[in-house]
Image: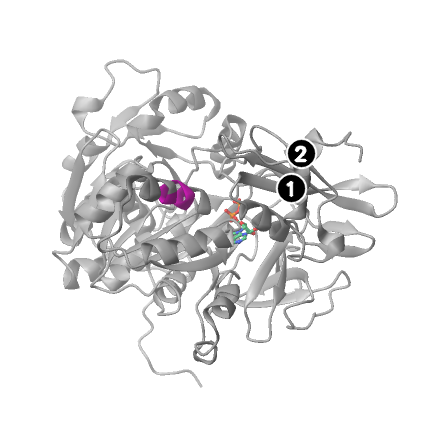
Protein backbone atom coordinates (compact mmCIF):
# COMPACT_ATOMS: atom_id res chain seq x y z
CA UNK A 1 0.00 0.00 0.00
CA UNK A 2 1.33 3.45 -0.86
CA UNK A 3 0.98 6.48 1.36
CA UNK A 4 -1.56 9.10 0.51
CA UNK A 5 0.57 12.21 0.72
CA UNK A 6 1.19 14.69 -2.07
CA UNK A 7 3.90 13.49 -4.39
CA UNK A 8 5.75 16.71 -4.96
CA UNK A 9 9.24 16.10 -6.34
CA UNK A 10 12.08 17.70 -4.36
CA UNK A 11 13.61 20.37 -6.59
CA UNK A 12 16.40 22.90 -6.06
CA UNK A 13 14.33 25.79 -7.46
CA UNK A 14 11.88 25.15 -4.62
CA UNK A 15 14.49 26.33 -2.11
CA UNK A 16 14.80 29.75 -3.72
CA UNK A 17 11.06 30.01 -4.31
CA UNK A 18 10.58 29.39 -0.59
CA UNK A 19 13.14 32.05 0.41
CA UNK A 20 11.74 34.59 -2.08
CA UNK A 21 8.23 34.09 -0.68
CA UNK A 22 8.89 33.81 3.06
CA UNK A 23 12.20 35.64 3.48
CA UNK A 24 11.75 38.08 0.62
CA UNK A 25 13.65 40.98 2.21
CA UNK A 26 16.48 38.90 3.70
CA UNK A 27 19.75 39.96 2.10
CA UNK A 28 22.43 38.38 -0.03
CA UNK A 29 25.62 40.46 0.06
CA UNK A 30 28.59 39.77 -2.19
CA UNK A 31 32.04 41.17 -2.75
CA UNK A 32 32.57 41.39 -6.50
CA UNK A 33 35.67 40.49 -8.53
CA UNK A 34 35.25 43.85 -10.31
CA UNK A 35 35.46 45.56 -6.90
CA UNK A 36 32.80 46.83 -4.49
CA UNK A 37 29.94 45.16 -2.63
CA UNK A 38 26.65 44.07 -4.17
CA UNK A 39 23.55 43.84 -2.00
CA UNK A 40 20.07 42.56 -2.80
CA UNK A 41 17.35 40.28 -1.43
CA UNK A 42 16.12 36.72 -1.93
CA UNK A 43 13.15 38.18 -3.86
CA UNK A 44 15.53 39.94 -6.29
CA UNK A 45 17.76 36.85 -6.53
CA UNK A 46 14.74 34.76 -7.46
CA UNK A 47 13.71 37.25 -10.12
CA UNK A 48 17.18 37.34 -11.67
CA UNK A 49 17.53 33.52 -11.54
CA UNK A 50 14.31 33.28 -13.57
CA UNK A 51 15.63 35.85 -16.06
CA UNK A 52 18.76 33.69 -16.29
CA UNK A 53 16.67 30.55 -16.91
CA UNK A 54 14.95 32.40 -19.78
CA UNK A 55 18.33 33.48 -21.16
CA UNK A 56 19.71 29.94 -20.97
CA UNK A 57 16.60 28.59 -22.72
CA UNK A 58 17.02 31.23 -25.46
CA UNK A 59 20.61 30.00 -25.93
CA UNK A 60 19.27 26.49 -26.48
CA UNK A 61 20.13 24.98 -23.08
CA UNK A 62 17.75 22.20 -22.09
CA UNK A 63 17.38 19.30 -19.65
CA UNK A 64 20.59 17.40 -19.01
CA UNK A 65 22.91 19.89 -20.76
CA UNK A 66 26.04 20.75 -18.82
CA UNK A 67 26.76 24.42 -18.19
CA UNK A 68 30.15 25.22 -16.66
CA UNK A 69 31.09 27.91 -14.13
CA UNK A 70 34.55 29.22 -13.21
CA UNK A 71 33.58 31.66 -10.51
CA UNK A 72 34.03 32.95 -6.96
CA UNK A 73 31.34 33.03 -4.30
CA UNK A 74 29.11 35.86 -5.57
CA UNK A 75 25.45 36.60 -6.14
CA UNK A 76 25.85 35.82 -9.86
CA UNK A 77 27.26 32.38 -9.09
CA UNK A 78 24.32 31.89 -6.72
CA UNK A 79 21.92 32.78 -9.58
CA UNK A 80 23.67 30.23 -11.81
CA UNK A 81 23.20 27.53 -9.15
CA UNK A 82 19.44 28.11 -9.33
CA UNK A 83 18.94 29.21 -12.96
CA UNK A 84 20.82 26.25 -14.47
CA UNK A 85 19.62 23.48 -12.13
CA UNK A 86 16.13 25.00 -11.93
CA UNK A 87 15.46 24.51 -15.63
CA UNK A 88 16.69 20.90 -15.47
CA UNK A 89 20.22 21.44 -16.81
CA UNK A 90 23.42 20.55 -14.90
CA UNK A 91 25.43 23.25 -13.12
CA UNK A 92 29.03 22.11 -13.53
CA UNK A 93 31.17 24.05 -11.08
CA UNK A 94 34.84 24.02 -12.07
CA UNK A 95 37.70 24.52 -9.63
CA UNK A 96 40.03 27.16 -11.11
CA UNK A 97 42.85 26.00 -8.82
CA UNK A 98 43.18 22.73 -10.73
CA UNK A 99 46.09 22.36 -13.11
CA UNK A 100 45.54 23.57 -16.67
CA UNK A 101 45.52 20.05 -18.17
CA UNK A 102 42.95 18.95 -15.57
CA UNK A 103 40.70 21.89 -16.47
CA UNK A 104 40.86 20.98 -20.16
CA UNK A 105 40.14 17.35 -19.32
CA UNK A 106 37.17 18.21 -17.10
CA UNK A 107 35.48 20.64 -19.51
CA UNK A 108 35.81 18.17 -22.38
CA UNK A 109 34.75 15.20 -20.29
CA UNK A 110 31.65 17.05 -19.06
CA UNK A 111 31.00 18.39 -22.59
CA UNK A 112 30.03 21.79 -21.24
CA UNK A 113 27.97 23.75 -23.79
CA UNK A 114 28.30 27.17 -22.18
CA UNK A 115 30.87 28.42 -19.72
CA UNK A 116 30.24 31.29 -17.31
CA UNK A 117 33.33 32.92 -15.77
CA UNK A 118 34.42 35.81 -13.55
CA UNK A 119 36.62 38.62 -14.80
CA UNK A 120 39.56 37.23 -12.77
CA UNK A 121 39.62 34.17 -15.00
CA UNK A 122 39.59 35.93 -18.40
CA UNK A 123 43.30 35.20 -19.13
CA UNK A 124 42.82 31.55 -18.10
CA UNK A 125 39.67 31.17 -20.20
CA UNK A 126 41.37 32.65 -23.27
CA UNK A 127 44.00 29.91 -22.98
CA UNK A 128 41.39 27.19 -22.37
CA UNK A 129 39.03 28.06 -25.23
CA UNK A 130 41.04 26.64 -28.16
CA UNK A 131 41.14 23.26 -26.38
CA UNK A 132 37.44 23.12 -25.44
CA UNK A 133 35.48 22.55 -28.66
CA UNK A 134 32.17 21.67 -26.96
CA UNK A 135 31.80 25.17 -25.47
CA UNK A 136 29.58 27.20 -27.81
CA UNK A 137 29.61 30.46 -25.84
CA UNK A 138 31.73 31.97 -23.08
CA UNK A 139 29.83 34.29 -20.76
CA UNK A 140 31.72 36.89 -18.74
CA UNK A 141 29.94 37.42 -15.41
CA UNK A 142 29.92 41.20 -15.35
CA UNK A 143 28.35 44.29 -16.95
CA UNK A 144 29.16 45.85 -20.33
CA UNK A 145 31.65 48.31 -18.79
CA UNK A 146 34.07 45.48 -17.86
CA UNK A 147 33.90 43.59 -21.15
CA UNK A 148 37.22 43.59 -23.03
CA UNK A 149 37.26 45.61 -26.27
CA UNK A 150 38.76 42.71 -28.18
CA UNK A 151 39.01 39.08 -27.19
CA UNK A 152 39.97 35.89 -29.01
CA UNK A 153 37.06 34.10 -27.30
CA UNK A 154 34.44 32.76 -29.71
CA UNK A 155 30.93 34.02 -28.89
CA UNK A 156 31.90 36.05 -25.86
CA UNK A 157 28.75 37.27 -24.10
CA UNK A 158 28.01 39.61 -21.24
CA UNK A 159 26.11 38.21 -18.25
CA UNK A 160 24.27 41.39 -17.32
CA UNK A 161 23.17 41.95 -20.92
CA UNK A 162 21.89 38.39 -21.22
CA UNK A 163 19.74 38.92 -18.14
CA UNK A 164 18.55 42.41 -19.03
CA UNK A 165 17.13 41.10 -22.31
CA UNK A 166 14.83 38.64 -20.52
CA UNK A 167 11.58 38.87 -18.56
CA UNK A 168 11.32 37.30 -15.08
CA UNK A 169 8.06 35.47 -15.82
CA UNK A 170 9.57 31.98 -15.77
CA UNK A 171 7.74 28.98 -14.28
CA UNK A 172 10.23 26.47 -12.88
CA UNK A 173 9.46 23.16 -14.61
CA UNK A 174 8.44 20.12 -12.56
CA UNK A 175 10.44 16.95 -13.20
CA UNK A 176 11.57 13.76 -11.51
CA UNK A 177 13.49 14.58 -8.33
CA UNK A 178 16.25 12.17 -9.41
CA UNK A 179 17.09 14.48 -12.33
CA UNK A 180 20.78 15.49 -12.39
CA UNK A 181 21.31 18.98 -10.95
CA UNK A 182 25.02 19.67 -10.59
CA UNK A 183 28.42 18.20 -11.27
CA UNK A 184 31.71 18.46 -9.38
CA UNK A 185 35.00 16.76 -10.22
CA UNK A 186 37.28 15.50 -7.45
CA UNK A 187 40.78 16.97 -7.34
CA UNK A 188 42.36 13.78 -8.66
CA UNK A 189 45.65 13.69 -6.79
CA UNK A 190 46.67 10.35 -8.28
CA UNK A 191 44.23 9.74 -11.14
CA UNK A 192 42.29 11.83 -13.65
CA UNK A 193 39.55 13.85 -11.89
CA UNK A 194 36.25 12.00 -11.48
CA UNK A 195 32.83 13.61 -11.81
CA UNK A 196 30.24 13.36 -9.05
CA UNK A 197 26.78 14.05 -10.49
CA UNK A 198 24.33 15.25 -7.82
CA UNK A 199 20.53 15.08 -8.20
CA UNK A 200 17.80 17.42 -7.02
CA UNK A 201 16.74 14.80 -4.49
CA UNK A 202 20.25 14.21 -3.10
CA UNK A 203 20.84 17.96 -2.85
CA UNK A 204 17.58 18.66 -1.02
CA UNK A 205 18.09 15.80 1.43
CA UNK A 206 21.65 17.01 2.06
CA UNK A 207 20.32 20.56 2.64
CA UNK A 208 17.93 19.29 5.32
CA UNK A 209 20.76 17.30 6.89
CA UNK A 210 23.11 20.32 6.85
CA UNK A 211 20.49 22.39 8.67
CA UNK A 212 20.21 20.07 11.69
CA UNK A 213 21.15 21.37 15.17
CA UNK A 214 24.11 19.00 15.45
CA UNK A 215 25.23 19.95 11.96
CA UNK A 216 25.34 23.61 10.78
CA UNK A 217 22.53 24.65 13.11
CA UNK A 218 21.58 27.79 11.15
CA UNK A 219 18.27 29.64 11.29
CA UNK A 220 16.50 32.75 9.98
CA UNK A 221 18.42 34.67 12.67
CA UNK A 222 21.80 33.71 11.25
CA UNK A 223 24.17 35.48 8.90
CA UNK A 224 26.16 32.90 7.00
CA UNK A 225 29.49 33.38 5.24
CA UNK A 226 30.84 30.37 3.30
CA UNK A 227 34.58 30.73 2.79
CA UNK A 228 34.49 27.29 1.20
CA UNK A 229 34.24 27.92 -2.51
CA UNK A 230 31.11 27.49 -4.59
CA UNK A 231 33.45 26.05 -7.26
CA UNK A 232 34.15 22.92 -5.21
CA UNK A 233 31.49 20.59 -3.71
CA UNK A 234 28.81 23.31 -3.75
CA UNK A 235 30.45 25.24 -0.90
CA UNK A 236 29.46 22.35 1.41
CA UNK A 237 25.80 22.90 0.48
CA UNK A 238 25.60 26.36 2.09
CA UNK A 239 24.08 28.07 -0.99
CA UNK A 240 21.16 25.61 -0.62
CA UNK A 241 21.01 25.46 3.18
CA UNK A 242 20.81 29.28 3.50
CA UNK A 243 17.57 29.85 1.51
CA UNK A 244 16.02 26.73 3.09
CA UNK A 245 16.41 28.37 6.50
CA UNK A 246 16.11 32.02 5.45
CA UNK A 247 19.65 32.91 6.55
CA UNK A 248 21.24 36.14 5.37
CA UNK A 249 24.01 35.09 2.98
CA UNK A 250 27.37 36.89 2.72
CA UNK A 251 29.54 35.87 -0.24
CA UNK A 252 33.22 36.91 -0.01
CA UNK A 253 34.06 36.85 -3.76
CA UNK A 254 37.80 36.64 -4.38
CA UNK A 255 38.66 38.31 -1.02
CA UNK A 256 39.79 35.30 0.98
CA UNK A 257 42.61 36.99 2.89
CA UNK A 258 42.06 37.35 6.63
CA UNK A 259 41.68 41.16 6.65
CA UNK A 260 38.95 41.10 3.97
CA UNK A 261 37.11 38.29 5.72
CA UNK A 262 37.29 39.99 9.09
CA UNK A 263 35.90 43.19 7.59
CA UNK A 264 32.88 41.30 6.23
CA UNK A 265 32.33 39.37 9.48
CA UNK A 266 32.11 42.60 11.43
CA UNK A 267 30.34 44.81 8.89
CA UNK A 268 27.62 42.26 8.01
CA UNK A 269 27.16 40.76 11.47
CA UNK A 270 28.18 37.25 10.41
CA UNK A 271 27.25 34.52 12.94
CA UNK A 272 28.32 31.36 11.09
CA UNK A 273 31.22 30.57 8.77
CA UNK A 274 32.83 27.49 7.24
CA UNK A 275 36.23 26.76 5.73
CA UNK A 276 39.37 24.63 5.54
CA UNK A 277 42.16 24.68 8.16
CA UNK A 278 44.58 26.71 5.99
CA UNK A 279 42.15 29.65 5.81
CA UNK A 280 41.51 29.50 9.57
CA UNK A 281 45.25 29.48 10.32
CA UNK A 282 45.55 32.70 8.31
CA UNK A 283 42.62 34.25 10.14
CA UNK A 284 44.00 33.20 13.54
CA UNK A 285 47.39 34.80 12.82
CA UNK A 286 45.62 38.01 11.75
CA UNK A 287 43.43 38.09 14.88
CA UNK A 288 46.47 37.59 17.12
CA UNK A 289 48.68 40.13 15.38
CA UNK A 290 45.98 42.81 15.29
CA UNK A 291 44.66 41.86 18.72
CA UNK A 292 41.07 41.59 17.44
CA UNK A 293 37.92 39.81 18.66
CA UNK A 294 34.71 38.90 16.81
CA UNK A 295 31.59 40.77 17.83
CA UNK A 296 28.94 38.50 16.22
CA UNK A 297 30.62 35.30 15.01
CA UNK A 298 29.42 32.45 17.23
CA UNK A 299 30.08 29.29 15.26
CA UNK A 300 32.48 27.99 12.66
CA UNK A 301 33.03 24.72 10.84
CA UNK A 302 36.46 23.38 9.98
CA UNK A 303 36.88 20.45 7.60
CA UNK A 304 38.03 19.30 4.21
CA UNK A 305 41.47 18.32 5.53
CA UNK A 306 42.90 17.12 8.79
CA UNK A 307 42.59 19.85 11.42
CA UNK A 308 45.35 20.18 14.02
CA UNK A 309 43.87 20.27 17.56
CA UNK A 310 45.87 23.45 18.28
CA UNK A 311 43.65 25.30 15.79
CA UNK A 312 40.41 24.13 17.43
CA UNK A 313 41.72 25.14 20.81
CA UNK A 314 42.85 28.60 19.72
CA UNK A 315 39.51 29.59 18.19
CA UNK A 316 37.62 28.29 21.19
CA UNK A 317 39.86 29.58 23.99
CA UNK A 318 41.20 32.83 22.53
CA UNK A 319 38.33 33.96 20.32
CA UNK A 320 35.29 32.42 22.02
CA UNK A 321 33.93 30.74 18.91
CA UNK A 322 32.24 27.32 18.92
CA UNK A 323 34.33 25.51 16.34
CA UNK A 324 33.00 22.20 15.00
CA UNK A 325 35.14 19.70 13.18
CA UNK A 326 33.50 18.09 10.10
CA UNK A 327 34.48 15.43 7.60
CA UNK A 328 33.23 14.73 4.12
CA UNK A 329 34.14 14.49 0.46
CA UNK A 330 32.80 15.37 -3.00
CA UNK A 331 31.31 11.88 -3.13
CA UNK A 332 29.19 12.50 0.02
CA UNK A 333 27.74 15.86 -1.10
CA UNK A 334 29.98 16.52 1.02
CA UNK A 335 28.85 16.31 4.67
CA UNK A 336 29.46 12.96 6.35
CA UNK A 337 30.21 13.63 10.02
CA UNK A 338 30.19 16.64 12.32
CA UNK A 339 31.64 16.67 15.81
CA UNK A 340 29.31 17.80 18.60
CA UNK A 341 29.12 16.30 22.08
CA UNK A 342 26.27 14.14 23.37
CA UNK A 343 24.59 14.86 26.70
CA UNK A 344 26.41 11.89 28.34
CA UNK A 345 29.71 13.66 27.64
CA UNK A 346 28.83 16.99 29.23
CA UNK A 347 29.94 15.75 32.64
CA UNK A 348 33.45 14.91 31.38
CA UNK A 349 36.37 17.19 32.21
CA UNK A 350 37.21 19.94 29.66
CA UNK A 351 40.31 17.98 28.64
CA UNK A 352 38.33 14.80 28.04
CA UNK A 353 35.72 16.72 26.06
CA UNK A 354 38.47 18.30 23.97
CA UNK A 355 39.85 14.87 23.00
CA UNK A 356 36.41 14.03 21.57
CA UNK A 357 36.14 17.38 19.78
CA UNK A 358 39.35 16.76 17.85
CA UNK A 359 37.72 13.74 16.18
CA UNK A 360 35.92 14.09 12.82
CA UNK A 361 32.59 13.43 14.53
CA UNK A 362 29.35 11.49 14.41
CA UNK A 363 27.53 10.46 11.24
CA UNK A 364 24.66 12.76 10.29
CA UNK A 365 21.30 11.25 9.38
CA UNK A 366 21.62 10.18 5.74
CA UNK A 367 25.13 8.77 6.12
CA UNK A 368 25.68 5.27 7.41
CA UNK A 369 29.26 4.16 7.89
CA UNK A 370 31.46 1.23 8.90
CA UNK A 371 35.15 0.36 9.07
CA UNK A 372 36.47 -2.89 7.61
CA UNK A 373 39.74 -4.83 7.50
CA UNK A 374 41.58 -5.93 4.34
CA UNK A 375 39.24 -8.91 3.94
CA UNK A 376 36.15 -6.69 4.21
CA UNK A 377 35.20 -7.82 7.73
CA UNK A 378 33.55 -5.15 9.89
CA UNK A 379 35.84 -3.90 12.68
CA UNK A 380 34.66 -3.08 16.21
CA UNK A 381 33.69 0.44 17.29
CA UNK A 382 36.23 0.55 20.11
CA UNK A 383 38.10 3.70 19.10
CA UNK A 384 41.26 1.61 18.64
CA UNK A 385 40.80 -0.70 15.63
CA UNK A 386 41.34 1.15 12.39
CA UNK A 387 40.31 0.16 8.91
CA UNK A 388 38.90 1.35 5.58
CA UNK A 389 35.94 3.69 6.00
CA UNK A 390 32.86 2.77 3.95
CA UNK A 391 29.70 4.89 3.66
CA UNK A 392 26.25 4.68 2.13
CA UNK A 393 23.17 6.84 1.95
CA UNK A 394 20.88 8.89 -0.29
CA UNK A 395 23.47 11.62 -0.87
CA UNK A 396 26.45 9.32 -1.44
CA UNK A 397 27.75 8.74 -5.01
CA UNK A 398 26.58 5.53 -6.75
CA UNK A 399 28.61 5.88 -9.94
CA UNK A 400 31.03 8.46 -11.39
CA UNK A 401 29.83 10.54 -14.34
CA UNK A 402 30.76 8.85 -17.63
CA UNK A 403 32.69 6.09 -15.84
CA UNK A 404 34.72 3.84 -18.18
CA UNK A 405 33.49 0.69 -16.49
CA UNK A 406 30.16 1.42 -14.83
CA UNK A 407 28.76 -0.85 -12.16
CA UNK A 408 31.71 -1.63 -9.89
CA UNK A 409 31.92 1.41 -7.66
CA UNK A 410 29.29 0.49 -5.11
CA UNK A 411 28.48 -3.11 -6.01
CA UNK A 412 28.79 -4.06 -2.32
CA UNK A 413 26.16 -1.43 -1.47
CA UNK A 414 28.88 0.72 0.14
CA UNK A 415 31.22 3.42 -1.17
CA UNK A 416 34.89 3.03 -0.23
CA UNK A 417 36.02 6.50 0.89
CA UNK A 418 39.78 5.91 0.62
CA UNK A 419 40.08 7.09 4.22
CA UNK A 420 41.23 4.97 7.15
CA UNK A 421 39.45 5.59 10.44
CA UNK A 422 38.52 4.45 13.93
CA UNK A 423 35.00 4.64 15.39
CA UNK A 424 34.65 4.83 19.18
CA UNK A 425 31.86 3.23 21.28
CA UNK A 426 29.93 6.54 21.31
CA UNK A 427 30.03 6.61 17.47
CA UNK A 428 32.70 9.27 16.98
CA UNK A 429 34.77 8.65 13.86
CA UNK A 430 38.39 9.67 13.62
CA UNK A 431 40.36 9.71 10.38
CA UNK A 432 43.85 8.33 10.85
CA UNK A 433 44.97 8.49 7.22
CA UNK A 434 44.14 8.35 3.54
CA UNK A 435 44.48 4.63 2.76
CA UNK A 436 47.37 5.34 0.39
CA UNK A 437 49.22 7.34 3.08
CA UNK A 438 49.01 4.83 5.91
CA UNK A 439 52.42 3.69 7.22
CA UNK A 440 52.93 -0.02 7.85
CA UNK A 441 55.76 -0.61 10.26
CA UNK A 442 56.49 -4.22 11.25
CA UNK A 443 52.99 -5.23 10.15
CA UNK A 444 51.30 -2.58 12.34
CA UNK A 445 49.68 0.63 11.13
CA UNK A 446 50.89 4.07 12.16
CA UNK A 447 48.70 7.14 11.67
CA UNK A 448 50.58 9.83 9.75
CA UNK A 449 47.90 12.42 10.61
CA UNK A 450 48.38 11.95 14.34
CA UNK A 451 52.13 12.40 14.04
CA UNK A 452 51.64 15.51 11.88
CA UNK A 453 49.17 17.06 14.33
CA UNK A 454 51.61 16.58 17.18
CA UNK A 455 54.45 18.22 15.23
CA UNK A 456 52.25 21.21 14.36
CA UNK A 457 51.48 21.54 18.06
CA UNK A 458 55.15 22.51 18.60
CA UNK A 459 55.55 26.32 18.64
CA UNK A 460 58.50 26.24 16.22
CA UNK A 461 56.73 24.28 13.48
CA UNK A 462 54.65 25.85 10.70
CA UNK A 463 53.72 22.76 8.68
CA UNK A 464 54.40 19.04 8.88
CA UNK A 465 54.01 15.90 6.80
CA UNK A 466 54.77 12.29 7.68
CA UNK A 467 55.38 9.67 5.00
CA UNK A 468 56.34 6.02 5.09
CA UNK A 469 59.81 5.29 3.69
CA UNK A 470 61.07 1.72 3.01
CA UNK A 471 63.10 0.28 5.88
CA UNK A 472 65.19 -2.93 5.80
CA UNK A 473 63.91 -4.26 9.13
CA UNK A 474 60.41 -2.81 9.59
CA UNK A 475 59.38 -2.67 5.90
CA UNK A 476 58.42 1.00 6.38
CA UNK A 477 59.17 3.67 8.97
CA UNK A 478 57.73 7.18 9.38
CA UNK A 479 59.79 10.12 8.13
CA UNK A 480 58.80 13.55 9.46
CA UNK A 481 59.22 16.42 6.98
CA UNK A 482 58.66 19.88 8.46
CA UNK A 483 58.71 23.57 7.68
CA UNK A 484 59.97 25.71 10.57
CA UNK A 485 58.29 29.00 11.44
CA UNK A 486 60.26 32.09 10.32
CA UNK A 487 63.15 32.74 12.74
CA UNK A 488 62.34 29.63 14.81
CA UNK A 489 65.20 27.34 15.79
CA UNK A 490 64.75 23.72 16.74
CA UNK A 491 67.03 20.75 16.21
CA UNK A 492 65.97 17.36 14.85
CA UNK A 493 66.69 15.76 18.25
CA UNK A 494 64.53 18.32 20.09
CA UNK A 495 61.64 17.74 17.74
CA UNK A 496 61.79 13.96 18.09
CA UNK A 497 62.04 14.27 21.90
CA UNK A 498 58.78 16.26 21.74
CA UNK A 499 56.96 12.99 20.88
CA UNK A 500 58.07 11.33 24.16
CA UNK A 501 55.07 10.20 26.16
CA UNK A 502 52.62 11.43 23.51
CA UNK A 503 52.63 8.32 21.30
CA UNK A 504 53.83 4.72 21.54
CA UNK A 505 57.63 4.51 21.29
CA UNK A 506 57.51 2.67 17.95
CA UNK A 507 55.32 5.42 16.44
CA UNK A 508 57.94 8.12 16.97
CA UNK A 509 59.31 9.15 13.53
CA UNK A 510 62.56 7.50 12.60
CA UNK A 511 64.05 10.77 11.32
CA UNK A 512 63.30 14.44 10.61
CA UNK A 513 64.02 16.52 7.51
CA UNK A 514 63.66 20.32 7.38
CA UNK A 515 62.38 21.83 4.11
CA UNK A 516 61.42 25.34 2.97
CA UNK A 517 57.97 24.30 1.80
CA UNK A 518 55.77 21.24 1.34
CA UNK A 519 54.01 20.29 -1.93
CA UNK A 520 50.23 20.88 -2.08
CA UNK A 521 47.37 19.84 -4.37
CA UNK A 522 45.29 22.38 -6.24
CA UNK A 523 42.87 22.41 -3.31
CA UNK A 524 45.59 23.07 -0.75
CA UNK A 525 45.96 19.54 0.64
CA UNK A 526 49.35 18.00 1.27
CA UNK A 527 50.52 16.26 -1.90
CA UNK A 528 52.12 13.20 -0.38
CA UNK A 529 52.58 11.43 -3.72
CA UNK A 530 55.05 14.19 -4.66
CA UNK A 531 56.72 14.06 -1.26
CA UNK A 532 57.17 10.30 -1.55
CA UNK A 533 58.80 10.85 -4.97
CA UNK A 534 61.08 13.53 -3.50
CA UNK A 535 62.23 11.15 -0.76
CA UNK A 536 62.25 7.97 -2.87
CA UNK A 537 66.03 7.63 -2.58
CA UNK A 538 66.07 8.41 1.15
CA UNK A 539 68.38 6.33 3.30
CA UNK A 540 68.02 6.11 7.07
P1 LIG B 1 39.31 15.69 -3.44
O1 LIG B 1 40.38 16.52 -2.76
O2 LIG B 1 39.72 14.32 -3.84
O3 LIG B 1 38.45 16.45 -4.39
P2 LIG B 1 37.45 16.20 -1.47
O4 LIG B 1 37.66 17.66 -1.62
O5 LIG B 1 36.13 15.63 -1.65
O6 LIG B 1 38.34 15.35 -2.34
O7 LIG B 1 38.13 15.79 -0.09
C1 LIG B 1 37.82 14.59 0.55
C2 LIG B 1 38.92 14.10 1.44
O8 LIG B 1 39.46 15.13 2.25
C3 LIG B 1 38.44 13.07 2.40
O9 LIG B 1 38.33 11.80 1.83
C4 LIG B 1 39.50 13.13 3.50
O10 LIG B 1 40.64 12.39 3.18
C5 LIG B 1 39.86 14.58 3.52
N1 LIG B 1 39.12 15.22 4.61
C6 LIG B 1 37.97 15.93 4.55
N2 LIG B 1 37.61 16.39 5.75
C7 LIG B 1 38.55 15.97 6.63
C8 LIG B 1 38.75 16.11 8.04
N3 LIG B 1 37.93 16.81 8.79
N4 LIG B 1 39.83 15.51 8.59
C9 LIG B 1 40.69 14.79 7.84
N5 LIG B 1 40.57 14.64 6.51
C10 LIG B 1 39.51 15.21 5.90
Q: Is residue 438 left or right of residue 171?
A: right
Q: Is residue 375 left or right of residue 218?
A: right
Direction bottom: furthest residue:
1
Task: State the image quarter where residue 21 is shown.
Answer: bottom left
- Identify whether 532 is placed above or below 444: above
Residue tagged by mark 2?
513
User: Dividing the image into 4 quarters, which one contains the C terminus?
Assistant: top right
Direction left: furthest residue:
25
Overall secondary structure of the magenta section: helix
Q: Position of residue 180 (x, y in %)?
A: 42, 53
Q: Which residues are magenta?
A: 279-284
- Identify whether 373 is placed above or below 127: below
Instruction: Check if mark 1's residue and mark 2's residue have beta carbons within 8 Å.
Output: no
Judging depth in this view, the residue of 216 and 537 nearest the camera is 537
Residue tagged by mark 1?
494
Judging depth in this view, the residue of 219 and 456 nearest the camera is 456
Numbered disc 1: secondary structure: helix
Task: State the image quarter where residue 347 is shown.
Answer: bottom left
Amino acid sequence: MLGLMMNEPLRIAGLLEHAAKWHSDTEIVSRLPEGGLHRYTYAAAHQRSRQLANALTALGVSTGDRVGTLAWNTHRHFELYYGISGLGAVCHTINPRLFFEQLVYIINHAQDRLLFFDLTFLPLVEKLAPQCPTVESWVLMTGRAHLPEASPLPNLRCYEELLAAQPADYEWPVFDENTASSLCYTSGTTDQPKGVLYSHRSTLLHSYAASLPDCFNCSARDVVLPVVPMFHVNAWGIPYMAPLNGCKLVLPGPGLDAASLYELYEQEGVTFTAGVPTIWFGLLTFMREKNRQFSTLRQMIVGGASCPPALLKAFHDELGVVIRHAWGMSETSPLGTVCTLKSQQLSLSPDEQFVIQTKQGRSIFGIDMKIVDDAGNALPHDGVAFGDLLVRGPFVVREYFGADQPGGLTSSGWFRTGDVATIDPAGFMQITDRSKDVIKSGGEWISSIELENLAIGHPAIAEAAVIGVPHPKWSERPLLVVVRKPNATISKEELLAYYDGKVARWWVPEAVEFVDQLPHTATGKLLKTKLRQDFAEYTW
